[in-house]
Image (tube, rainbow, N blue to C red):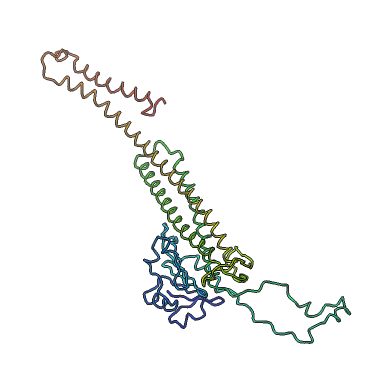
Amino acid sequence: MFLAHKPGAPARAIESEADAQDVTWIDLLNPTPQEQALAGCICGQPLPTLDDLSEIESSSRISVRNGAAFLSTPLLKKIGPEFQSSPVGFILTADRLITIRYQPYPSFEAVAQLVAEHILPPAPASTPAPSTVVGPAQDAAHPDQKSPQTAAAPPQRLKPAPIGAGEILVALIETIVDRLADILENVGLLLDKLSQDIFKRRQNKSPMHSIAAWQRDLLERVGSAGDLCSRVRDALLGLERITIFLGESKKDGAAPASGLPLSARRFEAGVSSLSTENAPYALSGALRGRMTTANRDLSSLTDYVSQAASKVEFLLDATLGFISIEQNGMMKVLTVVSFIGVAPTLIAGVYGMNFKDIPELEWRYGYWYSLALMTASVVLPLLWFWRKGWLGGIK
């Protein structure tokens, strides 16, 4: 899918280079080779492929070529009950943003909707008629009478300004960061529920197959939580690199007022007084401020996911500890069973020998004596194990 997003207009499909004229944001969703080639012609240089976007080294994820910044990072997508990672690419030029993704993401859909609903700047107002212009003398003569121009003048408001590719990219990153924060909140709730399930008291009369299924389910949940934390960490690391790069790409001159309220992070226009290289893809002062804030949010999320990963390791150790306790209990039972079978077997072996000088062979009560001796060899160890607490007796 090859879509063109123009402020104030709904998204439309791009089938030729003419369809991309005056388009601020070009979005490729799981593009075909033909769409990839067409986007490369529009951009003026080859676009990265899926293999290029999947590279993990920093130089491959952030690079500058022919006046355009090529950025990439993995993002999370929930497919069924599991989260999967897929790379996303951003190509930022002076007047256009090109995104390449292979999964639909709610963040992109939300920003695309806001871009389509953006109100374009109004046309310049015409010069008022002479009859509606009131001079200072008339105001002094009639101080209590307001002029028609003053009475009809609306309150001063910030007029919407045209949005550019940099602002759309910043809005996308902010929305993605908010989405990752929501995912981490769900991770925290999941770990809390998992901790309760691990440490809650279970019924002692639960069958062994039920305990084994419970332990297997806990291990699967702990493994899934650890995998999710690892994927979130990769996404946060990629976004943090991008925000640092964009925050340091400075542009001289006054930054225009933001005309696209894509999130609650609204910054006023500012002026950058630093004299730096004015790269074509560089952001204005207000957008760089928003990137700095996004970078701080990413740092806090990175600390949170590190804490979550530590908790996953703790829960894994606790789960393995409980499994070890269960195995020790089973080994105690097997030890008892094997021990109480040794003495009767020894007695039966002794009196099964074919020697004539065994005194009990000619005894009238020799058989009952051997049975009583076997019973005592079973009961006495059982009482001893019970008093030791191995069989649920005295602790």
240 versus 101 height, above or below = above
| Viewer-side residue, 92 vs 148 | 92
Q: Is residue 356 left or right of residue 89?
A: left
Task: Answer with the quarter of the image where residue 344 lies.
Answer: top left
Count of marks, rendered view: 0
* Residue that protrudes farthest toward the bottom in the picture: 130
Image position, residue 251 (x, y; %):
57, 69
Q: Nearer the viewer, residue 128 or 273?
A: 273
Please determine whether, in this image, residue 141 is positioned above or below residue 306. below
| Left or right: 172 in relation to 224 | right
**Depicted 372 relative to depicted 91: above or below:** above
Q: Which residue is painted at 45% across and 56% down in the image?
A: 232
State the image quarter where residue 17 is shown.
bottom left
- Where residue 116 sits in the image (x, y, percent)? 55, 74
Task: From the viewer's perspective, tell me whether residue 79 is left or right of residue 352.
Answer: right
Q: Nearer the viewer, residue 94 or 33?
A: 94
Picture coordinates of residue 52 (x, y %)? Answer: 38, 66
Q: What quarter of the picture does the C terminus occupy? A: top left
Q: Residue at x 57, y 76 (%)?
A: 8
The residue under the point 47% across, 44% down is: 195
> Residue at coordinates 73% horizontally, 72% vertically from top-left?
155
Give residue 51's quadrant in the image: bottom left
Point out the image quarter for the N terminus. Answer: bottom left
- Residue with the most extreme front position: 275
Q: How far from the left and from the top, in percent, is residue 354?
A: 11, 19
